[in-house]
Every structure is written in structure tokens, then in C-alpha cells.
Amino acid sequence: MEFKLKTGLATKYSFILALTFVSIVGCKNEPMSGTTDKKESVTPVKIPRFNQDSAYAFIEKQLSFGYRVPGTEASYKCKDWIVNKMKSYGADVEEQDFKASFLGKTDVDATNIIAQFKPSNKKRVLLCAHYDSRLVAEKDADESIQNDPIPGADDGASGTAALIEIGRILQENPIDLGVDIVFFDAEDQGDNDGAQDTWCLGSQYWTNNPHKRKYNAEFGILLDMIAAEGAVFHKEGYSYQYARDYTDKIWKLAQAMGFGDLFQNRVIGGITDDHFYINTVLGIPTVDIINTAGMSSGKTFGDYHHTHADDINIINKRNLRIVGQIVTAVVYKTYDRSFKKIR
Ligand SMILES: [Zn+2]
């Protein structure tokens, strides 16, 4: 399925691109191919359809394992499922084990999952999400269950599900672009009263010990809490600080695709999330797409955040599809070089 871009700017741009395409073919009188004169001659691709039902089923599947707290049986089962799923889509998958200490637990066995599509391709895009769910529900109104783990349907499972679906899409619609999909463990076990680096343990480990020496990607996108009812995506502060150009392009694309109700232009403060370490340690400009619907009521996140309300009922399939479709579009537009030209 191909998206009709709705704004005048984008339409004009598509038109100019179409003209460029025609004139290159006309001047050189050569067949189009992805390999000759790569800079000019990548054929514009159709953007595949992101399947919301498939992605939704991947959320349900993660929840079926139980609470994916690092070091638990549920977490290991979920990890194995993600690994096998990504292998079945043709990715080279590495499991990166590390020890995580959090919320009174020490040296828990945790694992990042790194799924690489076209691993030898130099041009790469990084997509990531955390697959762990939080050990406690400190924001729950019911104090008696604040020490119980949350389902994490949105906080963890939604971003993970969208990336698994994108893995499926990449297998069905192969492109000559390296895509690394990294599922971080132990993102969400931080101490609200503690240091910033009590969060994002998986991404801290990976950025300091990347799976490949001198690992690099052109840019990255982190998905965290993308599918809750009432979601709003503002331009998050660290994304804006370290990856402003990519942030602006993603938001412009989203708005051109008709999703300006979700992707709003307001720039908000920085949020400590996995992208912070990718930006600051590896220097890969990385954008966080994260629901900050609470901004309108003086909070940051939605009311369900770190409560037991973060279960399957909070998931809105349209929101899941919108974010998944936008990220899919970014990937395919990076391949045919039309993403870079968004202004
Ligand atoms: Zn969280």
C-alpha cells in the first residue's frame, strides 16, 4: 500500500522526485537498478502495509508469558520467543548477556537481543525498544499493589511488538538496507529517587559493548509506549537535542501521512530512555517516539504509566498501526533516499 501524502509541501516534493526520476532515466537511458550509480538510481519503493492485527497479537503473546521482569522465567520465555521469531524472519540474531542490578536485586541474568537484517550492508538503520516490564507499580492509586509487577502492555510490549512486525515486513519486502532491531532488557527497573543510570541498563551495556566493533548506524528510532488509548507524541528533548533533523523529518512525515493529531510539534524536556545512551555514548542520532499524553495535565506520561492499568485494555490498535506504519515508511524511505529529502 502506498501512502498519499496530504500536505502541499510533501505532494510538491513527491512531484519533484518523480520528475528527477524521469529525467535520470531519460538522460542516461539506462535501466533503473539499485546497484548502478547508487546515489541517483534507487527506484522509489512502495511502502508495505504495517499489519495492526499481527502487531496486536505480538503484544498479547508477550503478555501471555507473564511479567517480563529481568531474571524471571517469563522474561526468558519471552526472550526465546523474540529470538526465534526474528530468526524465522531471516535476521541474524545475537543474544547479549549481561548482569543487571536493580531495585534491591543484584547480578540478575539479563539479555539484549540484536536482530540484524543484511548484516554486511554498510548503510544501516537502528530500531529499538525495551522488552522488559517493570517490577513495581509505584504510581498505582491502590497502595496495596504498588509492589506488584505491571503487565506492561504499552510500556515495553507495544514497541517490541511493532518492531517484530517490522521484522516480518522486512522479510516479505526485502530492501538493500541494513536494519538492526535491538530489544533491550532492563530498561524499566530504575529507581525514581535514585540516579539516572539506574534506568536503561540494557542500552547502557550495549552502547558500551556494541555487538560489532565500531558499530554505527545512520540514525536510530526508539519506540517506548506507542499504542495506548489517548497517546500523544511530542518532540522529546534529548531527541531534539541530539537528532533534531531526524525528529523533524519523522514528525513532518507523520503529519503528511495524516497523523498530526498524534504527532504534535511541541518540544518537551528530555526523558531518560534508551536513546539517551545511544546518542551520548555511541553518537548515533536517535529519536524516541514515546507517549507523553500527560503533558497537558502537568505530568509527563499517561495515567496508566507504571500502574496495573497498563494492560491489554489500554492498547488502541489505531495508534499501534499509526506508529508502526510511520516507522515502516521511514525505513523504506531511507532505502529509496526520499526520507532524507523531507523538509
Ligand atoms: Zn516504564
Image: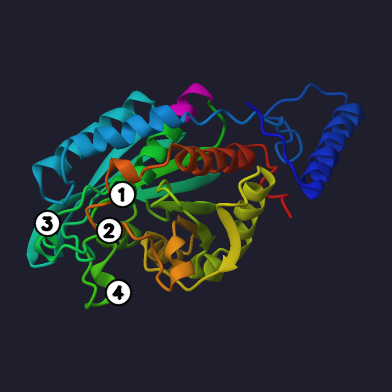
Disc 1 marks which amino acid?
Gly
Residue depicted at 85% across the width and 41% down the height = 16
Q: Nearer the viewer, mark 1 or mark 4?
A: 1
Disc 1 target residue: 156
Q: Earlier in the sequence, mark 3 or mark 4?
A: 3
- Residue 258 in picture, x, y percent from top left: 65, 44
Examine the structure image and report whether residue 181 is included in the region drawn in magenta. Answer: no
User: Looking at the image, is mark 1 or mark 3 nearer the viewer?
Assistant: 3
Estimate the x, y position of residue 52 in percent, counting from the top left. Answer: 45, 31
- The residue beneath circle 2 is 187
Numbered tag placed on residue 196 in the rendering: 4
Identity, as a three-letter code, of the amino acid under mark 2: Glu
Q: In this rendering, would 250 be left or right of 74?
A: right
The answer to whether the residue labelled 1 contacts the one labelled 2, judged by CB atoms less than 8 Å apart, is: yes
Distance between the alpha carbons at the discs numbered 1 and 3: 16 Å
- Label 1 beta carbon less than 8 Å to ligand 1: yes
**Magenta stretch, main secondary structure class:** helix
Q: Of label 2 and label 3, which has the lower sequence position?
A: 3
> In terms of sequence position, does the residue under pointer 4 or pointer 2 come before the other?
2
Marks 1 and 4, the one that precedes in the sequence:
1
Q: Nearer the viewer, residue 249 or 284?
A: 249
310 lies above or below 147: above
Which quarter of the image is occupied by the C terminus? bottom right
Disc 1 and disc 4 in contact, CB within 8 angstroms:
no
Kind of residue sitting beneath label 4: Gln
Q: Residue 148 got which mark?
A: 3
| Residue 335 x %, y % | 62, 38
Q: Which quarter of the rendered picture does the N terminus lie within?
A: top right
Separation (CA) of disc 1 from disc 4 = 19 Å
